[in-house]
Image (cartoon, rainbow, N blue to C red):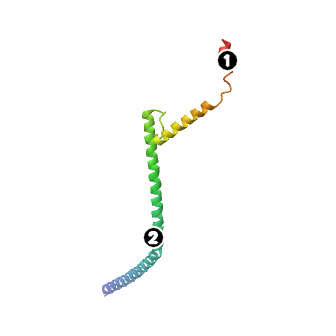
Amino acid sequence: MAVELKVADCTQRLADQLQTLSEVAEAITFRLLELEERLAAQELRLEPLLEGHADSQGLLADETELLLDDTEDRLARLEGLLKGIENQGVGRHLRPVVASQLAHAQEAQQESFLDDSLVEQPFLDEEEQPFLDELSA
């Protein structure tokens, strides 16, 4: 009889523990469902803000991309010029001379030549003075 009581007590204790375990699992499940609902509500509230932020990030990304492209082009030109200078020598122009620029430069040179020829030269009558080292010799 004592053995039967012990088996009955163990069975009752096991049933009580299973009941408690199922209640805990049920409470956890309800809490998890509640948290999922709250998370969904928060995501709905944040969705417009995230879309606005993504749009502004897209604009910033486009502007940044344009700046990076401009910088890349500028660096490529500088690299090409430096390679050209290394191959051609230091006296090479940094920009290619365009025909209109060349014609304008020639006109300016001719005008300055004409202006120089028209200017009076007041020191023509004076003799050229010898340099200091010529005097000591």
Nearer to us of marks 1 and 2 is 1
Q: Earlier in the sequence, mark 1 or mark 2?
A: 2
| Element class at badge 2 | helix
Residue 42: image x %, image y %? 46, 76
Residue 63: image x %, image y %? 47, 58
Occupied quadrant, residue 47: bottom left
Residue 112: image x %, image y %? 58, 35
Residue 21 to residue 99: above or below: below
Which residue in the protein does label 2 denote? 51
Give whichever of 24, 81 is nearer the camera.
Answer: 81
In the image, farthest residue toward the bottom: 1
In the image, farthest residue toward the front: 118
Q: Residues within 10 Å of mark 2 (few under 14, many from 20)?
A: few
Image position of 119 (left or right of 66): right
Residue 79: image x %, image y %? 44, 42
Residue 120 to residue 40: above or below: above
Q: Are marks 1 and 2 in contact (CB under 8 Å)?
A: no
> Which image quarter is the N terminus in?
bottom left
Q: What residue type is labelled 2?
A: Glu
Image position of 16 (left or right of 116): left
Residue 128 to residue 118: above or below: above
Q: How far apart are marks 1 and 2 (CA)?
A: 83 Å
The answer to whether residue 98 is seen in the rendering is: no
Image position of 113 (left or right of 88): right
Give whichever of 7, 132 is nearer the camera.
Answer: 132
Which residue in the protein does label 1 denote? 132
Give the residue at x 44% y 52%. 69
Q: Which amino acid does label 1 sit on?
A: Leu
Give whichever of 28, 85 is nearer the camera.
Answer: 85
Give the residue at x 46% y 51%. 70
Occupied quadrant, residue 61: bottom left
